[in-house]
Amino acid sequence: SKDWGTLHKYGIKTGANSFFLVIDETSKIKEMTDAEYLLLFGVNRAKHIVNWERQRWYFSEMNNNHYIIEQKYFKPLFKTQREADKLDINTTILKYHVLICNESKASLRNNKSRVLKYIEDAEKDFDFHKRPSCSGNQPEWYCLGRDLFVGDFVFPSKIGEKFRLIDNRNPQVFIDKVNYNIKVKDEKYSDILFLILNGMLFRYFIDLFSRQLTGSQTLSDVDVNVVEKTLVISPSLLIDKQKELQAILKSLKSREQGTIYQEVKQEDRRKLDTIVFEALGLEAIDVDILYKEACKFVKDRSEKSDSVVTTKVKQKLNYEQTLKLIRDRFDEINTYSNLIKNSKIKIYTIPNLPAIYPLETKTGSSNLFASYPVYFTKDQNKKISLSFSNIQQVMLLRFLLEEIDAKGIQLSIPESEKDCQQILQIVQRDFRNSIMQLRSVLKSVRSSANTISHYIIV
């Protein structure tokens, strides 16, 4: 929080993007022939009781299916800088819409709302209502809240050679968690603040105090605390320059923003930065020094990255950094430790050896003795056995060993057969949906941590 505005830490954090974010593909219906329409929906277009102005045809990445759902439950979402047109949000190219529904299932059922089918599919087929990232939502797991924050400006959490603060004052759309919301307290200073935060001085301070990423991506990884604590000139000091600033604002908004090397050559940007510097008691020549240092900072980062790549000594993230990265990027995945936290468990020390499983794992059936040994052996001279009380424990163990490589560690297994079965279904679905991206991220940061860092460790 500052005198001039309020910074909201993140945009919308759903905890399950594949469910909450959908793509509006209603336009494709309008392009269909009557024969194609009949084939798809099983009814003639003229007889189909659907109001395509109030209901839309949404594609869900949850199960790669389409749903006809009331439009009122979905709002446009700004997700990436590519969805901006110059310094404004282009609502016509926003890819995703986010589910904003705060009605109970009983109310949806009474009103015969189509969105209820979508919610029930998510529960029945994917157990989203059991995910820790969703189950705490109130009053229902699919409710993201009634007072969701919408900012006036959108600040990017990553800054490369290009930087631009996006104007969200007119569209007032929700934004994704990879961006930060900024809300202006006094509308009188709204335009001035927009220019100050798009100025080179503010950008330089942000670059200077942010974590620098090198390697495949060369950019500033901007923590929200950096944005909150970065000094900003009081907009009241520029109020007498309103006429000049309005002309600069119009000019900046009329063109695409270039790289930092291109921007320092732009007349409108130099005018803006000169006004800011003069209000601080500095001179126009000091702007040249700022431009030189700001460009040098970005260039040095890029050259360091090139050096890292060519010498093959890219900086590795340590264990804690890797774990934080994974949790931030894959918050929709259920961690194994969260899934078992309400279960009665037994702790096993898992040998780092090949495993031989009982025959019942192929059929899922039980035996009369309620004893299921798993043998770990490399040769006849070394054989270690672990005993389990039900076959679901063994099947869960087998998945964790074969898919997540949970070997050579202490592993907690629920004692309840039902708990094991439910947890196995959830981790299998998460594995199918996210494991390739998860492994790709770990590889890109050259982390020594493997996938058990996210699934097993707290």
Image (cartoon, helix red, strand yellow):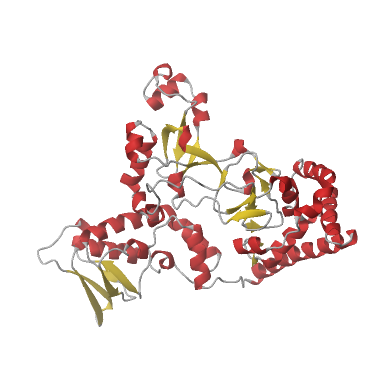
Return the residue nearer the eye: 445 or 189: 189
Q: List the single residue furthest toward the top.
A: 46
Q: Is residue 378 above or below residue 215?
A: below
How many numbered circles are shown?
0
Residue at x 67% of width, y 47% of height: 166
| Residue 372 x/y as whole percent | 18, 68
Whether residue 368 is visible to the viewer of this picture, yes or no, is: yes
| Residue 283 x/y as whole percent | 89, 61
Residue at x 47% of width, y 33% of height: 71
* Image quarter (top left, top right, bottom left or bottom right) of the C terminus: bottom left
| Residue 323 x/y as whole percent | 48, 67
Return the residue nearer the eye: 398 or 29: 29
| Residue 429 x/y as whole percent | 36, 53
Quadrant of residue 300 within the rendered picture: bottom right
Return the residue nearer the eye: 71 or 299: 71
Left or right: where does residue 296 sit relative to residue 23? right
Whether residue 262 is visible to the viewer of this picture, yes or no, is: no
* Image quarter (top left, top right, bottom left or bottom right) of the N terminus: bottom right
Q: List the single residue furthest toward the bottom.
A: 381
Left or right: where does residue 175 sit relative to residue 19? right
Q: In this view, does 411 lie above or below 48?
A: below
Q: Is residue 110 above or below residue 422?
A: above
